[in-house]
Amino acid sequence: MKAIDRSDICVVVINAEEGIKEHDKHIAGYAIERGKGLIFAVNKWDTVKDTTINDFQKLMRAEFQFAPYAPIVFLSALTKKRIHTLMPEIIKVKENIKREIKTSLLNEVINDAYELNIPPSYKGKRLKIYFTAQTGIKPPKFTFRVNNKGLVHFSYERYLENKIRENFDFEGTPIILQFKNRSGDEL
């Protein structure tokens, strides 16, 4: 786990012959928890005969539901088949984990998302988003100034993350959304 802590990007190698193990999920989860870029490399793909890349990709997405943004590459280290597909993904994730979004553009996307799907009210109160800014990289972190951070439902937070991902390329990197009360007092 120390290697994960020292890295910016983690390549989780899945043995195609053995399939996905619980340990693979544990390592990927730890990397995400630490805010690291993530790529899945399915090795020994040349030995697999009874399934397609598409089917294995569906299995990967089902097993790693907590990392739908992580790219998957299929290769064989022994025969060097498709090994050339790994480095471009690493470079892309390296760029994405350091990507910075202009505040005006980010606010435009968030305002459009808010207008498209206004959050439900809770006990007569409704979440209002006043301002959003990117406040960090490695991984990208976004801070939302809101009327009451207690009104942010996890499903609405996930909706906002998805809207950010739809509009900006953050493939391979977790993103952090932080909500703060505009008034500065913590409710």
Image: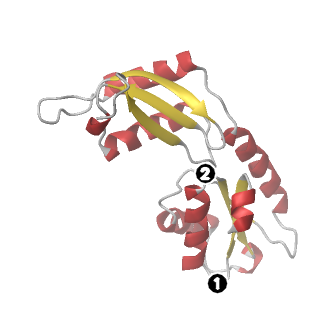
Indicate the quadrant where residue 178 lies.
Answer: top left
- Up/down of 178 relative to 113, above or below: below
Residue occupying the point 43% across, 29% down? 144
Q: Quadrant of the N terminus?
A: bottom right
Q: Nearer the viewer, residue 183 or 30?
A: 183
Q: Secondary structure at mark 1?
A: loop
Residue lying farthest bottom?
18
Say whether residue 179 is left or right of residue 58. left
Q: Amino acid at mark 2?
A: Gly
**Residue topped by disc 2:** 35
Residue 94 location (% of width, % of height):
74, 44
Residue 18 is tagged as: 1
* Residue at the far left in the pictured view: 124
Picture coordinates of residue 90, whole percent (x, y): 76, 51
Q: Amino acid at mark 1?
A: Glu
Whether residue 76 can be seen here: yes
